[in-house]
Image (cartoon, rainbow, N blue to C red):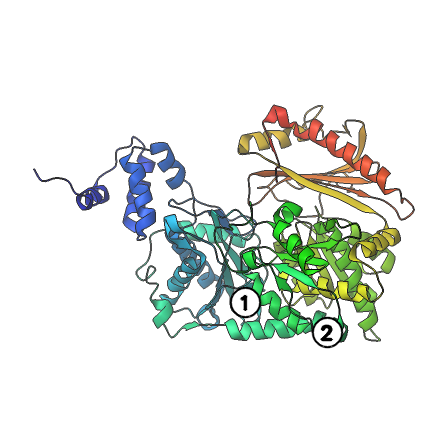
Amino acid sequence: MAENTEGDLNSNLLHAPYHTGDPQLDMAIGQWLRWDKNPKTKEQIENLLRNGMNKELRDRLCCRMTFGTAGLRSAMGAGFCYINDLTVIQSTQGMYKYLERCFSDFKQRGFVVGYDTRGQVTSSCSSQRLAKLTAAVLLAKDVPVYLFSRYVPTPFVPYAVQKLKAVAGVMITASHNRKEDNGYKVYWETGAQITSPHDKEILKCIEECVEPWNGSWNDNLVDTSPLKRDPLQDICRRYMEDLKKICFYRELNSKTTLKFVHTSFHGVGHDYVQLAFKVFGFKPPIPVPEQKDPDPDFSTVKCPNPEEGESVLELSLRLAEKENARIVLATDPDADRLAAAELQENGSWKVFTGNELAALFGWWMFDCWKKNKSRNADVKNVYMLATTVSSKILKAIALKEGFHFEETLPGFKWIGSRIIDLLENGKEVLFAFEESIGFLCGTSVLDKDGVSAAVVVAEMASYLETMNITLKQQLVKVYEKYGYHISKTSYFLCYEPPTIKSIFERLRNFDSPKEYPKFCGTFAILHVRDITTGYDSSQPNKKSVLPVSKNSQMITFTFQNGCVATLRTSGTEPKIKYYAEMCASPDQSDTALLEEELKKLIDALIENFLQPSKNGLIWRSV
C-alpha cells in the first residue's frame, strides 16, 4: 500500500464525513474546509482536526462574531469567530445584501474601503489583504469601490463616505487593541458609525449568505476592474483643506518657538500629522524614529494604546527631553485618538487624561468661536457633546456660557448620529469627546479624529505660550472658573461572562429583589441610572432619557457628595470599567480634599460593588 502523503491526507480531510460526535461541529468543519481558500488558516483547522482538538475546533467554528460598538473586532486566525479572509468575505456579502435592500442607487454611489497597517504572518492576514477582499466581493457584484491605495487614518473613511456620497464604508482596523486583533468598522451614508437596527440587520444578512459567491475570492479584481477607484489624493487634499476651518492663529503658529514631538505608535499617523502641521503653518513635529513607520508587531510598546500613559510614552518623552520639546503628541495606531503630555517646570511630565484634554478643548473651541463669530450668531444655537461616562466639565462650561451640552451613550457612533440630527436642525456643534482620548473638533468628520486633535492642541499650546501660560496652568484656570472636575477611570479584566452578569444582577437586587443600593460603604446614593434596563430614579417616570442598551451592562450612581460613578462592560474587550468623577462647584478649591474624597469613594465602589477577590477579577496592570 502506498504511503499516505500530505496531499492525500488533505484530500481525505476534505471529503471525509467528520465524526466528532457533534453534528453541528462536523458540519462546521466541512463548511470551513470547503470554503476557505487561504492555505494558512485552512491548515490551522486541518491541524486541529488531525490532533483531535475538538474543544478548540468547537470554540473556533461553532460561534460567529457579533456586531459590537465598532462593527466586528476579534483576533486574527482561523474560525468563524475570528477575523480572517473567509469571515471578512462573509461579512461583506452580508453588507452587500443589506445595502442592496436599503439603497436603490447603491451601484451608482458605491462603497468606501480603507485599512490600517495591522497584519499577522501565521494566518497571512493583513488589513490591506482584508480590504482587497472586501473590495473584491463588491466589485464582483458591479458595485463601484473607492479603495484607498495605501493605509489611512480611520477618520478618512467616514470623511470619504460623506464627500463621495457613497452609501457606506468599511475601515479594516482594530485601532489600539493588541497586535493579535483586527476589525471591520462600518460607517453609514451619513459618515457616522452604524447604530441599531443596522448592526442587527447586517448580521442577519451575513448569516443568510455564508457560502462565498463566485468571484468573492477574486482579489485580482482590485487591479483589473474599471469600477475600482483610488480616492487617496482627492480625500487627503479635501480633508487638509477642511482642517483650515478650525485653524485660528496660522500666523502665530508659523512664528512659535515651541517644539513638538509626535509618535504614531507604529501605525498610520506619521505622514498625515506632518501634513496637518503644515496646513496650520507649523514646522513639522519631530517624529519618534523607532515608532514612525508601520510595524504590525508594535515592537517598542507593551500595548499599542497611548491611553495607558507614561509607561507607553517612554520613547517620545525621552526624545522630547533630548530635543528640548515641551509637548508630546501621540496618535494611536489608526490615528483616531490622541494623547498629549507636557514637560513641567520641575522636569516631570504631565500626561493629560482624556477628560483633562477635553476641558482644554472645550474652553479653546468656545473661546475661538466667541472671537470669530459673525454678528448674528446666537450662543443658544451652539452645542458640545460628550458620552455619559465622560467628564461633566463641558456641562459646567455650558451652564456658565449659555450654550447647550448634551450627553450620549458611550461610543462615538452615538455622538456621530446625534451631531447629524443637530446639524440637520441648523445647530452648530463645536466639540465632542469621549474620555478614552477620543476628540472631535468641528464637524468635518463625524467620528473621533486624532490628526485634527493633534494640531489643535499644538495651536492651543502656541497661543498660550505667547502669554507665558502652559497647558497645565490653563487647565487649572478652566477648573477655577467652572469648577474642579477630578476623575479617575480604570478597569478590571474578567474572562467569565457569567461572573460579569452576576456582578451587575447583584446591584439590581442589592438588599432585596429589584432594589438598587442606597449606600456604597458610607457614601449615600442620590440617584441610580441603569442603561441596561432603562431605569432612572432621577426621572419622574423612572425611565432613562438615554436609549436602553440591553446587550451591554451599564449602571451610573450619583452620590450625595457630588460624585458620579459608572460601572460598565467594554464593547470590544473582556473588561469591567469604572469611571468616577468628583464634580465640584467653583467655590470648592481644595483639590487635595476633593481627591481624597474621590479615592475613598472609588475604594468603596471596588470593595462593595465589584468585589474583585470574591469574583476573581484581574486588576489592570500597565
**In which quadrant is the C terminus drawn?**
top right
Residue 476 is situated, as x and y percent measured from the top left of the image, at 84, 52
User: Which dot marks residue 254?
Assistant: 2
Q: Tell me if residue 215 comes above or below residue 253 in the rendering.
A: above
Q: Residue at x 35, y 66 (%)?
A: 140
Residue 230 is situated, as x and y percent measured from the top left of the image, at 46, 72
User: Which dot marks residue 266?
Assistant: none
Q: Residue furthest left?
A: 1
Task: Tell me which corner region of the image, top left, top right, bottom left or bottom right, holds residue 135.
Answer: bottom left
Judging depth in this view, the residue of 289 and 1 nearest the camera is: 289
Does residue 449 appear in this view? no
**Secondary-structure class at tag 2:** helix
Residue 621 is situated, as x and y percent measured from the top left of the image, at 61, 37
Judging depth in this view, the residue of 518 and 372 nearest the camera is: 372
**Category of crowding for the residue at label 1, using alpha-carbon neighbours closer than 10 angstroms: few (below 14), some (14–19), many (at least 20):** many
Type of the residue with mark 1: Val
Task: Tell me which corner region of the image, top left, top right, bottom left or bottom right, holds residue 493.
Answer: top right
- Say which of marks 1 and 2 sits in front: 2
Residue on which the image places disc 1: 161
Mark before the other along the chain sequence, 1 or 2: 1
**Secondary-structure class at tag 1:** helix
Type of the residue with mark 2: Ser
Q: Residue furthest front?
A: 322
Does residue 504 appear in this view? yes
Mark 1 vs mark 2, CA separation in Å? 33 Å
Q: Residue at x 85, y 60 (%)?
A: 402
Residue 426 is situated, as x and y percent measured from the top left of the image, at 73, 68
**In which quadrant is the N terminus drawn?**
top left
Q: Residue at x 28, y 43 (%)?
A: 30
Q: Tell me if residue 534 comes above or below residue 473 in the rendering.
A: above
- Residue 320 in the figure: left or right of residue 161: right
Q: Tell me if residue 18 comes above or below residue 70 in the rendering.
A: above
